[in-house]
Image (tube, rainbow, N blue to C red):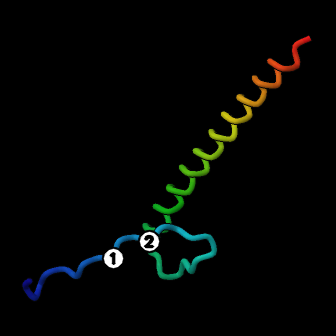
């Protein structure tokens, strides 16, 4: 390695609820916001999917 080689960057650690954010740059914070928004959307889709499945099952078993 030469003396002008860049230092190896540590891999980004996953976001942890309640972690200290003071050492993160604005770009890192924005990136994490995007990742978390995507995850919230994914979770909401799963809730909707499970609700639709539950409603379909209830409709099937509550026929008169």
> Is disc 2 placed on a helix, strand or loop?
loop
The crowd level at tag 1 (other Cα within 10 Å; few <14, some 14-19, many 20+) is few
Q: Position of residue 50 (x, y in %)?
A: 69, 36
Q: Position of residue 55 (x, y in %)?
A: 78, 27
* Label 1 sits on residue: 10
- Left or right, 52 with respect to 60, comes to left
Q: Residue at x 22, y 82 (%)?
A: 7
Q: Residue furthest front?
A: 61
* Res. 62 image quadrant: top right
Q: Is residue 49 above or below residue 15?
A: above
In the foreground, 57 or 2: 57
In the foreground, 44 or 24: 44
Q: Residue at x 77, y 24 (%)?
A: 57
Quadrant, the C terminus: top right
- Left or right, 26 with respect to 45, comes to left
* Label 2 sits on residue: 13
Using the numbered discs, state the Cα–Cα distance from disc 1 to disc 2 in whole angstroms.
Answer: 8 Å
- Left or right, 12 with respect to 45, comes to left
Q: Is residue 34 above or below residue 5?
A: above
Q: Residue at x 72, y 29 (%)?
A: 52
Q: Is residue 57 above or below residue 34?
A: above
Q: Residue at x 46, y 61 (%)?
A: 31
User: Tags 1 and 2 in contact by the CB under 8 Å rule?
Assistant: yes
> Is disc 1 placed on a helix, strand or loop?
loop
In the foreground, 9 or 49: 49
Q: Residue furthest right?
A: 64
Q: Residue furthest top?
A: 64
């Amino acid at each position: 390695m030469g003396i002008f080689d860049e230092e190896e960057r540590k891999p980004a650690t996953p976001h942890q609820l309640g972690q200290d954010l003071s050492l993160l740059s604005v770009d890192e914070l924005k990136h994490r916001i995007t990742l978390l928004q995507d995850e919230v959307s994914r979770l909401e889709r799963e809730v909707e999917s499970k609700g639709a499945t539950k409603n379909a099952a209830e409709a099937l078993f509550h026929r008169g």
